[in-house]
Structure formats: C-alpha cells, structure tokens
Amino acid sequence: MSTQTIQSALITGANSGLGFEAAAQLAMQGATQIILLCRNLTKAKQAQTLLEQKTEKYVFEVIAADMTQLNSVTAAAVILKEKAISIELLLLNAGVWPGTDINHNQQGIETAFASTLLGHHVLTASLLNSNLLSKHARIIISGSELARGDFPGTHLLNITQFANEHFSGQLTTAITTAAKASSPYQYNANNHYSFVKLCVSWWAAALSRRLPSPMTVNSVSPGIAIGTNAKRHQPKRARLIMSFLLPLLRKSAPVNVAAKRYLDVAQFPPSINGEFYASVPGKFVGKLVKQTTPHLLLESHQEACWEALVELTQGIDFPH
C-alpha cells in the first residue's frame, strides 16, 4: 500500500499545522475522500475552504469533535457510522502540549492526555467496532521523541517505580493516576507531555496485537515542527523558543516535512505493526528510524496502558 493508492482518510486536528498539511498532501496524491475532524465546525469549514484553495481539490468533508471530551468523540463516531464509509488511513494527529496549570476534561482527565490519546482511543475503538476501517487500513498516531526520555530539560516518569512506591506495583492504577494528574503524581508540563507521548507508543503497540491482519497501527513522531498550534497552552517564553530559536539552531523542521513523516510510514508493509518511528536518538529532526529504547518495548506496560484507557473510558475496548 502506498499513499498514491489511499482513497479515503480521516484526520484529527486537521484545521491547522500538521493535520492540515497532511490533508493537503493526501489530496494532491489522489485521495478522493478526506474527512477533517476538528474541534468545531467553524474551524473545520475554514480549513476545508483553505484546503480547496490550496489544492484545487474538492474532496474534503468536515465533522466536529473535541478530542478532549469523550461525549463529543462518541457523537462524531455516530455520524461516521451513518456515513457507512470505509477509511483507509486514520491519522490521529490532534493534541496539545500541556500548560503550566493543570486542566481537566469533564471526566477529570488531564486535557493533554485526553486530547492526545484518550479521545483517539475512543474514536479508534468506535471505528473498529463499527467496521468503518478498511481491511488493509493504516492507523498512524502522532508520537514524540520525548517518549525516549532524552529530551533536554525533561524527566520521564518511571512508571514502574511510581507504581511500586504508591500502588503496590499496580501499573494500571499508576497510569490512570498520572493521566488525571492527581496526587501523588507530581505534575510538570514538559515531564507530563513526555509521559503522554510514552503512553501513545505503548497504546499503539497494544492495539497492534488486537488488529486483524493486514491492518496496522504505528506511532510516528513528526519531530519538532514550526507552524503548529500544539504549543498554544505553553507560556509565551516557551512558545517563542519553539517558534524562533529552534529553527535558527536547525533543530526543527517545516510543517510540510514533518507531516510527510506520517504519510511515509503509512506506506510501510503489513509486517511493520505496533512500532514507534522517530528521529535517531538524541535528535528531534532528520532521519526517521524505529525506536528501540527498552522501556518503550515492555509488553506489560503496553497492556497496562491499554487497560488504563479502557478503565478511563468506562469500558470502551477492542479486544484481541
């Protein structure tokens, strides 16, 4: 399968940045149906108009879904079921970098975790259970090099140690506590985002064991990219560093290059499933390689993450 043969795609967070650019690239490659899933219809329709102007293709449809709110995602899934479509590429791109203060959704889950992973879990399970993904579908979820634990100025939570110290070794409880950013979890925005992206990698691996062949799922880091809206909850100083200093130091990539990473991995064969692709260790742009840092590959942690998401969504699952 290659991006040239993809006819239908659904992209979350498609009104700006990486999702918008990925939609444009897919349209130019010949996709005939691209569904833009955005936080509200106003943003979605604006993106649709801009994409049509940019590509001169009229293949875009819009649906509103706030990925931080489970009822909003569930409502969008109902609309998709009514369309009776067959999605070949599911690009789970939505998400935000957490801010200095903790914010929660209606279920008490920290919003970066909810928008980046929890909403995507609900959407993906709903599509799978409704048979709305084609038998050879590719699922791509946005990861980050931060999951490796080597990003300067951040500290990646040792979930095993956290579970042993506070929850008698119960990994699932430790993950649900961190997802809510509740005591005794020590919240720090950058550290928390590293944990969120680690859970993304674990979730993709756990889902890969549940998918029927030749369907696949992989986590893909777009790297550090300028021109996205993911940093909107960061302090102004941090946004300036990300937007201006990193490009000057050649530590970030343009949006079109970053978005292409998603589509490159969507071309991979069915034998590549449940992997995490990102820049080489110590880098945040450049060559895309499979990640092998040991803590990413712990099946017990991957399954605990899946169980935590099922618990946090009150039973939404896609079993083996």
Image (cartoon, rainbow, N blue to C red):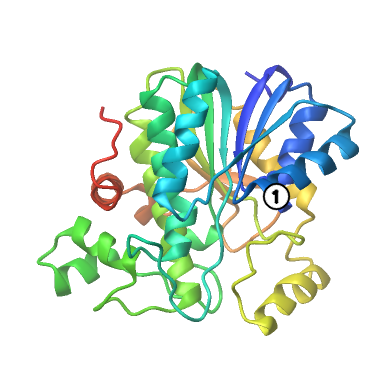
Q: Going by the image, does 208 lie left or right of 31? A: left
- Residue beneath the point at 26% across and 27% down: 320
Q: Nearer the viewer, residue 9 or 274?
A: 9
Residue 7 visible in the picture: yes
Residue 201 visible in the picture: no
Quadrant of the rendering where the N terminus is positioned: top right
Where does the image place residue 215, in percent across and percent down from the top left? Answer: 46, 22
In the picture of the structure, the residue carrying the numbered disc 1 is 42
Q: Residue furthest bottom?
A: 237
Q: Toward which corner of the image does residue 86 lie, by quadrant?
A: top right
Where does the image place residue 243, in percent across and percent down from the top left? Answer: 76, 71
Q: Going by the image, does 228 lie left or right of 136? A: right
Q: Nearer the viewer, residue 129 or 285?
A: 129
Q: Toward which corner of the image does residue 89 lie, by quadrant?
A: top right
Up/down of 125 relative to 257, above or below: above
Q: Residue furthest left?
A: 168
- Residue beneath the point at 83% across and 72% down: 248
Where does the image place residue 163, in percent across and percent down from the top left? Answer: 19, 66
Identity, as a three-letter code, of the amino acid under mark 1: Thr
- Label 1 element class: helix
